[in-house]
Amino acid sequence: MAGTVIVGAGHAGAQTAFSLRAEGYRGPITLLSAEERSPYQRPPLSKGYLAALRRRETDADDLINLHPVASYAEQDIALRLGSPVSEIDRHARRVHTTTGKAYGYDHLVLATGARARTLPFTTPRSERVRFFRTRHDAAAIAALTADASRVAVVGGGFVGLEAASVLAAAGAEVTVIEAAARPMGRGMSPVMAEYLLARHRARGVEVRAATRISAIVEDGGRLTIATGQDTTGPVDLVIVGVGVLPNDELAQKSGLETQDGIVVDSSLRTTRDPRVYAVGDCARFPSPFASAASVRLESVQNATEQGRHIAKSIATGTVSAYERLPWFWTEQCGLRVQMAGLVEPADECVVSGDPGQGAFSVLAFRDGRLAAVESLGRPRDHALARRLLADPAGWPEHGVLHGAGYDLSALRTAVISPATNTVDG
């Protein structure tokens, strides 16, 4: 029995491996990681981990470790660090690594993740221009900001603004530059985004939207950023967080279908080979929670639950559709925003609660039904939303919520467990 080979040891890959054992899978499991370090999680890198490194906490790595190193051997999972995969031979069902080793498989799981998107021009070869994606990036940024008083963050998405929040709290003068008309425009409602931006500005962060960068110039260890309108700087450090690109080249090279990600069916099997799965940031899959025919989601929840789904399919031999509700969170300026469902640009957004009191939710309606909820300071709303939105066929109608004053708790009888009288999540 060749067993299961998993390419990529991030959240999705590690979860798949451990879930296989939890589902009773007895075959060999090989987990191949391109990195030399034991698997770790990425979300804390731009938040708590960066802050801990700046405080020089010796146990900072505890914030990102996925599993104790010994647990892989305990679960009979062959973790192979420093083993980038160079080729997949689907005919022979073998994967080849750059180290010269080959691994046969009965099932292959591609959890290749994503990499930082680069800028459309050549950046200076400088330690002070940092792309933010890996643990190494976070460590370098923490070290560089020890003596950096002025920092520019290119990219106004979650990662860029989370990093900006940490650095501003540490006393740095921070400027955020975003090419789109508004930061956090992908995946967050205008209401919630504007609320967070106001908090950033209140902390002294300068946020410049609709601003495209044409060059980054280094002179004497200081950096200047040129835009179509003017320049920003000089600054001591430039952090670039302009999104990611899926690592789908290996799949494409092996003849699998790719389109901004590895294309899979509803069961997460690749469309051209039922023995090969894709999971996590690299997978493009059909979702009943999105208007588009397929989506690619970059979140811990999605990576974790897809890993569990694939593990059950392999271990039990059953095929079922992956239909779990997407949910996310971001931490900025001491605030935690929780999101359930996918907010889309055409959604009608209604505010429930009082933003002035720092506790409110944004309800997003699509075709007359509740499709997503963002909550700040209202964790109960988030828990309720996750129960209400779990089944797209049962999304509450706009009129029902309007009649309830857009109060999710008014629908609590539909989502509270009668046995415990508590809300899951």
Image (tube, helix red, strand yellow):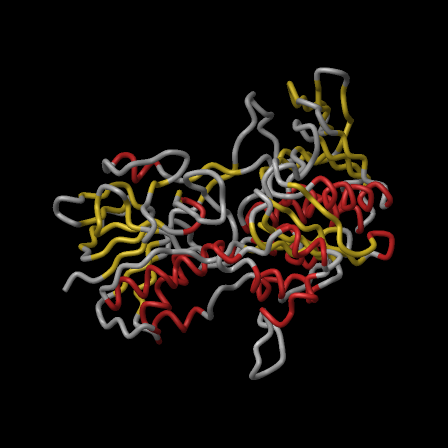
Where residue 413 sits in the image (x, y, percent)?
62, 72
Q: Which picture quadrant has residue 235?
A: top right
Above or below, 359 against 151 in this view is below
Nearer the observer, 161 or 417: 417
On-image quarter of the C terminus: bottom right
The residue at the point 65 percent across, 43 percent down is: 188
Where residue 66 sits in the image (x, y, percent)?
49, 64
Q: Is 8 placed left or right of 402 in the picture?
A: left
On-image quarter of the N terminus: bottom left
Where residue 211 sits in the image (x, y, percent)?
71, 24
Q: Which picture quadrant has residue 310?
A: bottom left
Above or below, 220 against 79 in this view is above
Extreme residue in the bottom direction: 419
The residue at the point 85 percent across, 46 percent down is: 203
Give the mark count: 0
Nearer the observer, 75 or 352: 352
Where residue 41 sits in the image (x, y, percent)?
52, 57
Nearer the observer, 118 or 399: 399
Q: Is 302 placed left or right of 337 in the picture?
A: left
Q: Which picture quadrant has residue 311?
A: bottom left
Q: Is 408 placed left or right of 16 in the picture?
A: right
Q: Is 280 placed left or right of 107 in the picture?
A: right
The residue at the point 21 percent across, 52 percent down is: 275
